Amino acid sequence: MERDLRVSRYAGGVTGSDELVDAWLPLPDIAERSDLGISKVRRFVEDRSIIGVRRGDRDIFQVPELFLGADWRPLKHLRGTLITLHDAGFDDEAAIVWLFTPDPSLPGRPIDLLRDGNKTEVRRRAQAMAL
């Protein structure tokens, strides 16, 4: 029951991931850009190095582009943060919303701090979200 409250608070409340994330990529595009096979990219999803949601008219699984570095591989500090959010009761949609929602106390969005290599404060905030 507590998990349902947290999920609805972040995913179904004020805004969803479509309003916050500018660019999305389906897994085949990630595989092509990274020069990795699709099976390796799917393993990134399975081991929670990246997450995504089904979206669009065709309900295609897509990942926020900012989850990937310049080499088109998952960001170094993203996996640990995603696991922390999952342990705090966030589903994938809610985790994406949280990472892309500006937080004036950080300052900025958690995803931007992760991209800059600042994982400590982001994970501290994620842990504080747990009930």
Image (spheres, helix red, strand yellow):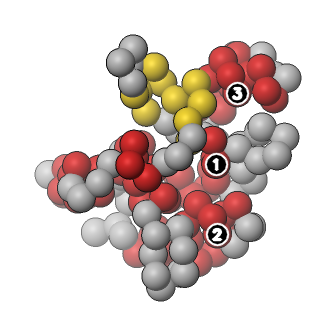
Q: Residue 37 shows which numbered tag?
A: none
Task: State whether residue 46 appears in this view.
Answer: no
Element type where label 2 sits in the image: helix
Assign the C terminus to one quadrant of the image.
bottom left
For the residues labelled 1 and 3, say whether their Cβ atoms are less than 8 Å apart.
no
What separation in Å lies between label 1 and label 2 (alpha carbons)? 11 Å
Q: Is residue 122 above or below residue 86?
A: below
Report whether 81 appears left or right of 11. Answer: right
Task: State whether residue 121 appears in this view.
Answer: yes
Q: Is residue 66 above or below residue 98?
A: above
Where does label 2 land, which residue? 113
| Residue 67 percent across, percent down from the top left | 64, 46
Which class describes the residues within 10 Å of circle 1: few (<14), some (14-19), or many (20+)? many
Where does label 1 land, which residue? 66
Q: Is residue 13 above or below residue 54?
A: below
Q: Is residue 33 above or below residue 74?
A: above
Three-letter amino acid code at the position of disc 3 = Ile
Where does label 3 land, which residue? 30
Element type where label 1 sits in the image: helix
| Residue 3 percent across, percent down from the top left | 24, 53
Residue beneath the point at 85% across and 23% down: 35
**Tag 2 or tag 1, which sits nearer the N-term?**
1
**Tag 3 or tag 1, which sits nearer the N-term?**
3
| Residue 72 percent across, percent down from the top left | 77, 37
What separation in Å lies between label 1 and label 3 (alpha carbons)? 12 Å
What separation in Å lies between label 3 and label 2 (alpha carbons)? 22 Å
Report whether 44 appears left or right of 129. Answer: right
Three-letter amino acid code at the position of disc 2 = Leu
Three-letter amino acid code at the position of disc 1 = Leu
Q: Across the whole image, how many numbered discs are drawn on residues?
A: 3
For the residues labelled 3 and 2, say whether their Cβ atoms are less than 8 Å apart.
no
